[in-house]
Structure formats: structure tokens, C-alpha cells
Amino acid sequence: MIKLISLVYRKKGMSDEEFYTYWRQTHGPLVASLIPFATGYVQNHPMQWPGLTYDADGIVEMWFESENDLRRYFEWRGTAEAAELKEDEDRFQDFKKTRRFVVHEYQFETTRRQWNAGAGLPDGPG
């Protein structure tokens, strides 16, 4: 499985609420209806979490069955058929800042090991 991971950045001047609402409610369904060759599309919206800061405003994951399908997707982005998608991206994101990673995905099943709270944490609290 080939995955395209993109770090996404909002346009300057957009509030968090405007960006995330538009991305989820407008752009997401548009992507799902338009993109060819991908087997999946996921948006990851960061959560506020104590002690964490984020470089990007979000992360997109797209899955492809083969490198050839990914190449064909990139070729498609250069066609007139992709214009609607690219125009929509320009409405809410700073595409010049977007960073992409093409990766092989390796999945491992976890055991969902239970933790004995009475034993304490290995490095203390938190």
C-alpha cells in the first residue's frame, strides 16, 4: 500500500473555525467525489493537548494500491478535470506551504495490553 501524506496549512487570516469547518464540510466531500485512483482519503484535525504544539493545521492521508496509481493521480492534478479541486484548495489553504510525503505503510497489530495503575508509571506521573 502506498500512502500520500500531506501537512496542510490554512490561508492567512482564516480562523480555526472557518478553516476546519470548510475543510471538513466542503472540501472533504468534494475530494471524495472527484479524486481518481485513490482507495481512501482521511483528514486529521489536531486536538488541543497539554504540552503539544503543532507545525501544521492538519494532515491528509490518501491511499493508493500502487505507485502507478499515485503517478496517475499526480498526472490527473495537472488536467482541466482537476481544476475544480485546485480552485477549492485555493479558497482555504496555503498550498505553497503544503508538504507531502510518499510512504509505504506498514501496519502492526497491537495487543491492547492493559496497564495496572497500581504499579505506577515507569517514569513517574504524566
Image (tube, rainbow, N blue to C red):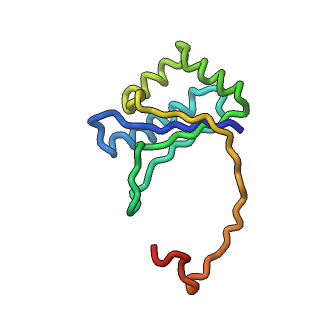
> Taking 40 as reference, is 56 left or right?
left
Most foreground residue, 46 or 118 = 118
- Quadrant location of the N terminus in the rendered image: top right
Coordinates of residue 112 in the picture (x, y in percent): 67, 68
Q: Nearer the viewer, residue 72 or 19?
A: 72
Toward the bottom, the furthest residue is 118
Q: Quadrant of residue 68?
A: top right
Q: Residue at x 54, y 78 (%)?
A: 121
- Residue furthest left as drawn: 13
**Relative depth, front residue between 103 and 34:** 103
- Residue extending furthest top? 80
Q: Is residue 14 left or right of residue 90?
A: left
Q: Residue 44 at x, y = what percent?
A: 50, 46
Residue 64 in the figure: left or right of residue 24: right
**What residue do we see at 52% from left, 40% from top?**
60
- In the rendered image, residue 102, in percent from the top left (x then y), is placed at 61, 34
Report the label total. 0
95 versus 5 height, above or below? above
In the image, residue 118 sits, relative to residue 109, either above or below, namely below
Would you identify the image quadrant in which residue 40 lies? top right
Residue at x-position 41% and y-position 32%: 97
